[in-house]
Structures are given as structure tokens and as C-alpha cells.
Image: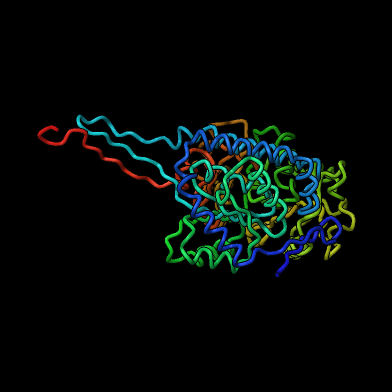
Amino acid sequence: MQEVSIITPVDGSTYAIRARSTDTQLEDALQAARAARLPWGTSTVAERAAVCTAFVDRVVAMTDLIVDELAWQMGRPIRFGPGEIQGFTERAQHMISIAESCLAPIASEPLDGFDRYIALEPLGLVLVIAPWNYPLLTAVNSIMPALMAGNVVVLKHASQTLLVGERLQRAADEAGIPGGVFTNLVLSHEQVGRTLADNRVDRVNFTGSVEGGRSIERAAAGTFTEVGLELGGKDPAYVRADTDLEFAAANVADGAFFNSGQSCCGIERVYVERSIYHEFVDAMVAEAGALDLGDPTKPETTLGPMVTARAADAVRLQLSEAVSDGARPLVAKTAGAWNDNTGSPYLAPEILVDVDHSMPVMTRESFGPIVGVMPVDSDDEAIEKMNDSNYGLSASIWTADPEAARSIGSRLQTGTVFMNRADYLDPSLAWTGVKDTGRGITLSRLGYTMLTRAKSYHLRLTPPGGL
């Protein structure tokens, strides 16, 4: 039997070992899911809401356990762990609360003698492939609306955060979600590929890398399985001269360095109006220097390790290449030996100036605590630079002028436009992206359109000539 080991970034030890699901277990889960589809899909929205609310409550009841396990699995400081549970709850409760109205039949205009409407029916089986960086938040985006829409769900969580899948399964079981409706499995890439290829999955929602997304598309090719992909970003921030500089610096730094920069919608490049450029950079450097890098299981730690030494070394390489090309690091002198410690997952935050778009640090996803900052002379120049990317998940504009934010936002190639905030998902808004960021929508009422299919009812109430 194959095993999967979770190597903790805290100290490099083996934190947990789990057996991979066998092909027989996978087949049994798919059969159980198919058997559960009809009874779950034909239950009422209110019935599903009651069970799903209990599911959320059971996750919240495990907060202390989950927070500790997150620190050991992926390095999130324990002081921030409760925030992920809070976000999980907020998103789940919102999707539950709007389900009745979002899933109600859509009536056509009245026509004498006819009843015409569109029903929204569940797709069937949804495969959710969740990542490690926000292992509850990213998972709930797909799991909760899929269940509320009447679908059955199979979850394949990232190998680094397998315990999150276990906690979700435990919560589902304790909440009384019927067998086969929600199943967590420990699957290999090969098993996922075969599952998609055999045409028993109606939709797959994947969050991960661009290459991972391409693999999902290849595996599902020819099956007509619906594919939803969120594949990361290189999200920009634009700081205008009319902004509250201290507020902007603090929040841009938080958007860049929170979760050790391991956020798809984290800020990875910053453009600042030239008249405030130096002042803003100084303020942002001060924010970065105040972070306390260390053991994530200690309450005083504000910046934990990256998920693996390999991930940290990839950021170190991008940093060294940028410096070789002329970029100037501003935080290195306060970073101690962290950034030179090849082979360690612990990486201090870094801010680079004298950067340009010939450098990978400004164009390729970093997914670590490193950010480049460039001056610009106008909104037009900022827009040009912000759009110069293969990604398009979110973009933030820091300004006192909402009309300027709307005007600039209308010209940005991105899924979400923020003003004076970043790195946040409002569950009432569509979470989506453009270009290599992927396709599809999660959250909001539009998220339900991704998880249902339309069935039209055209009912003649009185046949010609009467009854």
C-alpha cells in the first residue's frame, strides 16, 4: 500500500503519514456517490441547508485542532489560523443563505394557457481538487455551493494538507451528511487522471498551478466534463499620490507578505506614482522589517516558513536573478541569514527596487514573500504595466478617488478590482480570473450557475379544443 508523508516546514520532521486510497476504495467511493446523487439532489434546499449548517458548525468546533495542524502542515502562524476558520464560515454561511433564491425556478413572462419556467438542476458528481496554501478557504468555495446545489462531492486535498480533508470528512459525518454525498480521498495524480477520463465526473474544480490546470484539461479532454480552474496570479497594486500613504503601505505590505506570500491573490508587484515613490517605499520597508519570522507554533510569530524548502529556494533563485540583473534589495540587511540559508523553508520578506519587466520577479508568479516596486508617472502607465502579465486574478488601486478606481478598473485585465484593500474574497462577489489565471466562477450567485444545469419546462395547461 502506498503511503503519503507530510514533512512539516516547522522543523523538517515527518508530521503525519497516510495511506493512499486504493483503486478499490476509489471505485467504491464513485459508486456510492452515484447512488447518492438522486436522493440528495431531489431533497429540498432547506433540508440541505440544515445539514450543511451543521457541517460548518462541526468545523468551527474543531478550531483549536485545525489551527495547530495548519501550523505544522504548511507553516501558518497559529495567531492567524482562526482567521481561516472565520473565512471558511463566512463563505459557507453566505452560500447557504442565498441558495434558496439562487436555485429557485426562473419564470418566463406570463402567457395565457401555459406555464413556462427554467429549473436549475444539480450537475451530479463534482470533484474538488484543493490546494495547501488556504486549505479550508479554497475548498469551501467549491464544496459548499456544490452540496447546496444538490451535487455529490469527492474531495482530493493536497498531499501537504491531507489532515484538512480528514477534518472535513469528520465534520460531514458528524453533521449527518448522507453516505456518498461527501467523500474525502487520498488520491494520486494518476488516479485523478483516470477518474476524469472515465466520464463519471460531471465537473472538476481545480485550484493550483497553470501546469496542473493543463493536466486537468488534458485528462478531461473528450469527456465533456465541465472544468473550473483557478491557477494563480501575479497580482498588481497601484498606489496613487492621493492615497493615505501610511494606510496603503501597511496594507500593501500585508497583501504581499501575509501567509509568507503564498496566496494566489497576494500582491506580487507594486506601481507607485513617482511623487510619493520614495516615501512609500520607506514606509513599506518599515512594515516588512517589523515582521517576526520564526516558529509558527509560537504566538509571537507573524511570519512562518514557506511550505517547503524547495518552494523557498525557488524564490531565492528569483531573488538572486533579479539582483544580478540590477535590482536592489532593501530589507536584506535586516533579514539576518534567513535568505542565504539555501535548503531552509524559512525565508524573510524582501522588497526590490530598480526593477523592470525584463525581470521574472515582475512577470512570473513568485508565490513567496518577495515583491518588486516600480515608480510610474501616470494612470495610463500604471494600467499598461498592470496589464503586462499572463495572469489576471485581482488588482488593487490605492486612492482617495472612487471614480478614478472605477475608471482604472474598467481598463484592467483582471477578475477582481479592489480599492484600498487586497487579498480578500467577498463571498457575495464572483471569484474569477482571466488569461492564465483560469476559467469559471466560484462564490456569489453566479457560482451556482457553474454547478447546475438548466432544464426548461414548457407546459400547455389547456390543450387545443379544451379538455
Location of the C terminus (image quadrant): top left
361 on left or right of 95: right
| Farthest-out residue, right | 336
Residue 232 seen in the current view: no
Residue 215 seen in the current view: yes
117 on left or right of 206: left
Q: Position of residue 35 (x, y in %)?
A: 49, 53
Residue found 66% across the figure and 34% down from its top: 243
Q: Position of residue 131 (x, y in %)?
A: 65, 54
Front residue of 255/307: it is 307
Front residue of 40/243: it is 40
Q: How many marks?
A: 0
Q: Position of residue 82 (x, y in %)?
A: 75, 39
Front residue of 257/194: it is 194
Front residue of 91/177: it is 177
In this rendering, the answer to whether 371 lies above or below 212 is above
Residue found 79% across the figure and 62% down from its top: 309
Residue 102's quadrant in the figure?
A: top left
294 on left or right of 367: right
Q: How is the image coloured?
A: rainbow
Q: Position of residue 9 (x, y in %)?
A: 81, 57
Location of the N terminus (image quadrant): bottom right
In this rendering, the answer to whether 406 lies above or below 352 is above
